Image (cartoon, rainbow, N blue to C red):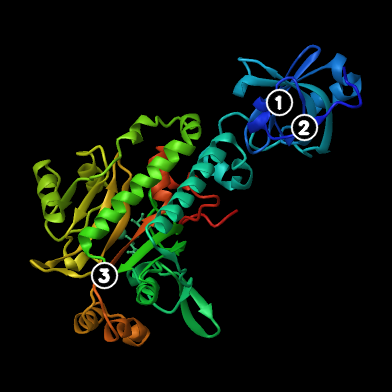
Amino acid sequence: MNTPAETVYETTISHIGAYENKRVELRGWLYNKRSSGKIVFVILRDGTGIAQCVASQKDVGEQLFAWLNRLNQESSLIVQGIVRKDSRAPGGYEVGLTGCTIVSEALDDYPISLKQHGVEFLLDNRHLWMRTPRQRDILMIRAEIVKACRDFLHSEGFVNVDAPILTPSACEGTTTLFSAKYFGEQAYLSQSGQLYNEAAIMSLGKVYCFGPAFRAEKSKTRRHLTEFWMVEPEAAFMRFEEMLGLEERMVCYIIESVLDNCESQLREIGRDPRQLINIKPPFPRITYTEAVEMLTQKGIAITWGEDFGAPHETEIASEYSKPVFVTHYPTKIKAFYMQPAPDNPETVLGADLLAPEGYGEIIGGGERIYDYNLLLERLKEHNLPLEEYVWYLDLRKYGAVPHSGFGMGIERVLAWICGLEHVRETIPFPRMINRLRP
Ligand code: 4AD
Ligand code: MG
């Protein structure tokens, strides 16, 4: 049967179904193994899936059989074998092993054995933890979301213009800045590319930046990272209402892409796709003032003018099965650049989008001040060093236009879509108040 002329198909586990009764070659890592007498089940993973390869002493010879039996988890292998349909095997196919090359034998017992481990241990071993199927699935969904953001924005005519990471000034308040030494000058890691986006729209009309953002957040919550990724669209002449529509369409496009292309990953990680199917426009909208009334009626203590904390956001969002826009926040709790609402200047044309199921704010955005004098006044009120904002004020000096934009945090959206307990699993190498490694 093993004639020299027989073709060996190099393929990946995700594609073995196309090679039934043919001989394939797979390259990957030993995920697990089970022995029973004269048979050893080699469970191989290759980044595209998991395959059960069955080796019998009679087919592979005594030496290889013995070797497979003692091999450590996560040794790297190239296996050859015949693909057979088997409804009991993961993926519906099994590989009858005929040969195996050990590329590199794992030198020690693998730290992340297949039993339960504590979260801190897993995070300390993130470089290995990310190999596990669940973490791989989450990272695949993350990649799908990133792609969906870019595809969506391109389809709406937005041009990608990225912003610098090293900056001399703050965008989102001075209390969460990470400082960096910059050849004798004081620099900070960017909190948001927004201010630079506002310059770019005067050149390109509609732009977005997509990159890491840094916040020296002292908060140790399930929603906060010190380094996270944000996609930030901004458009000249776009007004507040139009921006809310854009946010809605973008979130729905992302959900649809994940449901179309990652349904199996959602199921694998235990997320029921039905939780997401009804996320369609329009999203409910309430003002900050209405939200305060709602909370008060529910017996939750809050006074007008106070910012919402996570419990408030969870309570508000629990009234809806879709994300909800909270608009018209008090001016004094929002960033310096927010445009006052024409009918009530104590509030701003700004909105947070709160995700359902307690995931909190996933998007923050609004219309920006475009009047030179008002912006100057706000910069002073916020005690910001005017010399660092001269260029930003220039944008109001030379052809200012009404404009709006928003920022969406990838990790928060991913945590919600996947139904995760904490954002630490949503990014390849999380950075949090107590974690800089690995
Ligand atoms: O609401 P934020 O602070 O808004 C801005 O930075 C604006 N300048 C964006 C813009 O208008 N271009 O942040 C936007 C989003 C939040 O809604 C949240 O999803 C995410 O960024 N985010 C965080 N994600 C993880 N960890 C943190 N510490 C985050 N802070 C904000
Ligand atoms: Mg915000």
Residue 16, by quadrant, is top right
| Mark 1–mark 2 distance (CA, rounded to whole Å) | 8 Å
Q: Position of residue 254 (x, y in %)?
A: 40, 46
Q: Is residue 421 visible?
A: no
* Amino acid bearing label 3: Phe
Cβ–Cβ under 8 Å for marks 3 and 2: no
SS for dot 1: helix
Cβ–Cβ under 8 Å for marks 1 and 2: yes
In this rendering, is residue 246 above or below 403?
A: above
Nearer to the camera, 281 or 362? 281
Residue 416, by quadrant, is top left
| Mark 3–mark 2 distance (CA, rounded to whole Å) | 56 Å
Nearer to the camera, 320 or 68? 320
**Residue on which disc 3 sits:** 237
Q: How many marks?
A: 3
**Residue on which disc 1 sits:** 19
Q: Earlier along the polypeptide chain: callout 3 or callout 2?
A: 2
